[in-house]
Structures are given as C-alpha cells and as structure tokens.
Image (cartoon, rainbow, N blue to C red):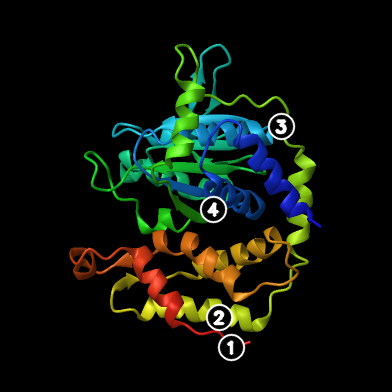
Amino acid sequence: MTNKAQDFEQQLHHEIGQVVFGVEHVVHALAVALIARGHVLLEGAPGLGKTLIGKTLTAAIGGDFKRIQGTADLMPTDIIGVHVFDSQKGEFSFHAGPIFADVVLMDEINRTGPKTQSALLEAMEERQVTIDRESFKLASDFLVVATQNPREFEGTYPLPESQLDRFLISIRMEYPDRESEMRVIRRYDLPGVEFGPSISNAIDKQALIDARSEIGAVHLSDELIAYCLDIAAATRQSELINLGLSTRGALALVRCARIEAALRGGEYVVPDDVKKSAAWVLPHRLVLTPEAELDGIHAADEVKRIIAAVSVTL
C-alpha cells in the first residue's frame, strides 16, 4: 500500500519519464527536493538534458517557469529585476526579473560572476528579494534548479560555499546507458521535433500538499539524529576536509532522510535512509584541502569513507 508521498513520486516519474529517459535517480531527487521545499544543483556535461528536466518538471507540477542563462556579464538586476522611472506617472515602478517564478532554471550557474551568484542567496534562503530597501515575496513553492558545468571547463567560476550550502541536494548527471540513449535518439531524431515538455495533465497541486503533510508522521528517533550529528562531526574532523558540514547541512540531512523513509513506505527513519541521503546532501557542501584535491580525491569519496566509518547505536 502506497502513501501520499509515494503517490506523488510515482506521478512525477510517469510525467517526466515520457519526455526524459534514463534519469530515474534524478526524478527521485527532485521529488525529495519538492517535498522538502529545497533547491537542486545538477552537475554534468552539456547536452545531457539538464535544461529539459527543469522545463519538464515545471510542466509536471503546473508551475510558472523561467530560465536564466548564466554568462560572465550577467548582472544581479538581470535576475531579480530593477526599478524603472515612468515619465508619464512621474515615479519609479518595479519591473520584476525572472526570479519571480515557481521554478527557476539557472543554467550554467558557475559561468556567472560572484556578485551575480550572490543575488540568489536571499531568494533561496528566505524566498524574497530586497531591492532599494524594499522586499518582494517570491512564490510559496519557489524552487531553483541550477545546472553546473564541471569546474575544469573554461570560463567557469567556483560557487562560493555560502551559495552551495543553500542547495538542499546536488545530483551529478552521467552519460545515459545505451538503451536510454537509443530511446532519446528514436524520440527526437526527426527534423522539427523539439526538446520540450509534452505533458497534457499537470499533477494536482493537492498531491504535493498531501505528500508534505505526511512527512511529519514519519518517526525520527534521537538515536538517528545523533547518528546524523556524528556524521557531521566526522566531516569537521577529517584531515582531508577544510570546511565540514554546517548546521544547515545537518538539518538538510535529517530532513531528506525522513522524506526517504516516507518514499519507501516506512513509518520511521532507518540508517539506510540517512546513508542514501548523505550521497546527495553532503559532497557539494564540503571543501577539501588542497592536498586532497592534488591527490585526486573527490568529496563524494570522502563522504563514502565517513559513512562507512561512523557507527550507529540504536
């Protein structure tokens, strides 16, 4: 018997699976983010369907979608908007930027400069933007889906730690398997066939509301909270990590673990829910030492080591 959270994820898989193939793990992560009201960072090479996933997700949940292309000359006002003087009225009026949408796809976010990246900080954390000392509320279900090219690509800027910490989860998109890639080619190879969402019936908004309402009923024991805090402490004590997991990151780990339990139909959180969530919540928040990076160690590798080393007492 499925619960409301599982029902919502199944509907999301059904809708997105009609357009994008071989990305079941990404859709699962998006379901977690939507239920948790968190933001998602998609990392991968160009041409893997990251933009298409963002557009299709928006169509699936029936929201307003805006896309921002990250470039080196993009300014904060290009994202949040600007006050423009109306000569007929003799006053300034606010022209809203693309940040005022249900789902904002920030494409190639690491091609923008630090000043522009910082324009998203308030929006992602507080769901509002402040312009000329005036605050404007964003959509209640405001969601940022940002795509990021690998850091070794030319013309990219590393995201600051404060920016990365505001993404609930980070998913790395790899090349699709042969069967999925065959489906993509068969579906989109004809001239004139566009890469775009083709969803006729959006998911009822009540389905997401119901899914969120169930999460509080999933039991989270003090022992599991202690386990999450032990993992956080291990990241802060690791000799390979300069910057360990923040309190915001520990809270994200606990929140995602609870949702993972609901999505598998569980009534309480188990260590495996924490371990599965850690792979998405931790790596992008950790800053490795220069020595670790020179040795070719990735944050995901250190997370795996920490998860294997930290024991849980139930």
Q: Are marks 3 and 2 in contact (CB under 8 Å)?
A: no
Residue at 29% x, 67% y is 288
Q: Amino acid at mark 1?
A: Thr
The Cα atoms of the two marked residues, 4 and 3, are separated by 27 Å
| Residue 290 percent coordinates (x, y) | 21, 66
Location of mark 1 (residue): 313
Q: Is residue 294 above or below residue 197?
A: below
Upstream in sequence: badge 4 or badge 3: 4
Tag in front: 2 or 1: 1
Q: Which mark, residue 227?
A: 2
Q: 291 or 110: which is nearer to us?
A: 291
Upstream in sequence: badge 2 or badge 4: 4
Upstream in sequence: badge 1 or badge 3: 3
Determine the secondary structure under disc 4.
helix
Location of mark 4 (residue): 125
Residue at 49% x, 81% y is 230
Q: Amino acid at mark 3?
A: Ala
Instruction: Kindly tell me whether residue 49 is visible in this rendering.
Output: no
The Cα atoms of the two marked residues, 2 and 1, are separated by 8 Å
Location of mark 3 (residue): 202
Tag in front: 2 or 4: 2
Q: Amino acid at mark 2?
A: Tyr
Q: 301 or 83: which is nearer to us?
A: 301
Tag in front: 1 or 4: 1
Q: Is residue 277 above or below residue 69?
A: below
| Residue 65 percent coordinates (x, y) | 58, 30
